Amino acid sequence: MMNNTRPDHLPQLKRADFASDFRWGCSTSSYQIEGGANLDGRGESIWDRFCATPGHIRDGSSGAVASDHYHLWPQDLDLARELGTNAYRFSIAWPRIFAEGRGKAPNQKGLDFYSRLVDGMLERGLEPWVTLYHWDLPQTLQEQGGWANRDTIDAFVGYADMVSRHLGDRIQHWITHNEPWCTAFHGNYEGVHAPGLKDFKTALQVSHNVLVSHGRAIPAIRANVANARVGAALSLHPLKAASDSAADVAATARHDGLRNRWFLDPLHGRGYPADVWAILGDSAPMVQEGDLAQIATPTDFLGVNYYFPEIVADAPGVGVMSTRVIETKNVERTAFGWEVSPEGMVTLLERVARDYKPAEIYLTENGSTYDDVVGSDGQIDDQQRRSYLVRHLAATREIVAKGIPVKGYFAWSLLDNFEWAEGYIRRFGLTHVDFQTQQRRLKASGKWYREFLRGDK
Ligand code: IFM
């Protein structure tokens, strides 16, 4: 395999290759970085509860302290500014606003924290991009059925209303949900994420209710925020059939149906894909009159989180969809085993633009994990992550050159953080975090991003 980490093999890039109003940022999420789990009136989230059960998290950890961003946020925003980014994507912990998920009075200390955080972004020239739901559902709501219960839709709209009322004077960009596929299927079918359920029908109902909550939150946000720009961030994958056989090709179409089209189609006014619906049988979600119209409420942009392509084979009897994702050999992979494929990102965005024609697309996440080593000089020479970043930015430039309306790129992630079921084993940061001391150190990848963004290469 080609050594893709050698600087002379990497494409040459400069910020000036992109429009001057292109959004450059990093993404983070509340549970993964904040810590401060019991501070200032924050309620329990499904992730606090999930992590407490031995066996759920590979290293037995939790996000209780994480990167201690709850205390260290000024220094983290300084880092984002020093990188030269002009935008910053973060999420709000719902249980900090409503400890039990809903209520007339919000937790003022929670609102104040985010208010200070947003002011801190603006003071540093960082445009705030907020995500309302990045998986930390209040545990009380889970006890009432979680996202499978339609009442959670109302609770989410109340929460979105409260947050947008308080922060809408300073935040223009609103992302309702991060990766609804993961919320639904990792959390409720595979059981590898909170709340840890393993029920396909529940997962499908969750996916539907999450989508309805997205559509219903939009008018609330627009009512509170002048010039609001709203969208959702989907995790999408380009797919290839494992072979030319009719069975593998058909399996790939089925897999695409649930992985990609199950979310893209209803958000773009097409309802659920008929081919998938026909397979679901009794597992299909309960859809009420008006739901599909609400899901299709017009948005301003589509957020795409891109990490890796998938190779799909027919697998009779495997799950409801009878498909299997297979691992091919001789492919460059990250430490997570995810295939590195900048060209897959090009294929994916061409497809999304062609089939759905979103007015604007933002790459709301893209990044990689490797086994970082801190050298004796204290430096983290993460050439693989640097190479990954450079090549995905070159792919972004190619996508833009094709006339696809990609308007921004957010690297995942600003900091090493709590990587869900993998705990602290997987590091995605452009900045290294020593979880004993909370010391931050920019990795080689972060230094490259800084040079690229500041044009001082
Ligand atoms: O860390 C996650 C993030 O929370 C959602 N998107 C994928 C990232 C890497 O796994």
Image (cartoon, helix red, strand yellow):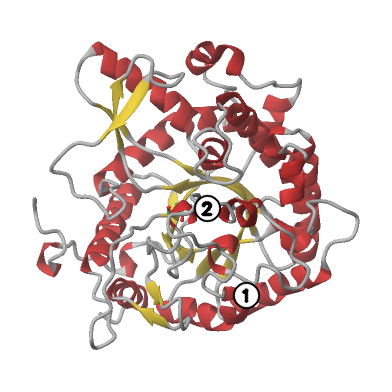
Label 2 CB-ligand 1 distance < 8 A: no
Spot occupied by residue 432 in the image (x, y as percentages of width and height): 38, 75
Going by the numbered disc 1, the residue's amino acid type is: Tyr
Name above or below for residue 439 compared with residue 146: below
Q: Residue at x 27, y 54 (%)?
A: 334
Count every numbered label the image shows and give the total. 2
Q: Residue at x 23, y 81 (%)?
A: 375
Position of 24 compared to 387: left or right? right
Find numbered disc 2 in the image and state the secondary structure of the residue it sits on: loop
Q: Are marks 1 and 2 in contact (CB under 8 Å)?
A: no
Position of 131 compared to 1: left or right? right
- Of marks 1 and 2, which one's residue comes earlier in the chain? 2
Spot occupied by residue 135 in the image (x, y as percentages of width and height): 60, 50
Q: Residue at x 78, y 68 (%)?
A: 41
Position of 87 compared to 171: left or right? left
Q: Residue at x 74, y 39 (%)?
A: 216
Name above or below for residue 286 compared with residue 90: above
Q: Which residue occupies the foreground of this view, 106 or 194?
A: 194
- Cα–Cα gap, marks 1 and 2: 26 Å
What mark, if any, has residue 70 been given in the picture?
Answer: 1
Residue 296 appears anywhere in the view: no
- The answer to which image quadrant residue 282 occupies is top right
Residue placed furthest toward the bottom: 377
Find numbered disc 1 in the image and state the secondary structure of the residue it sits on: helix
Disc 1 versus disc 2: nearer the observer: 2
- The answer to which image quadrant residue 378 occupies is bottom left
What mark, if any, has residue 54 been given in the picture?
Answer: 2
Quadrant housing the C terminus:
bottom left
**CA neighbours of label 2 inside 10 A, class few (<14), some (14 to 19), many (20+):** few
Going by the numbered disc 2, the residue's amino acid type is: Pro
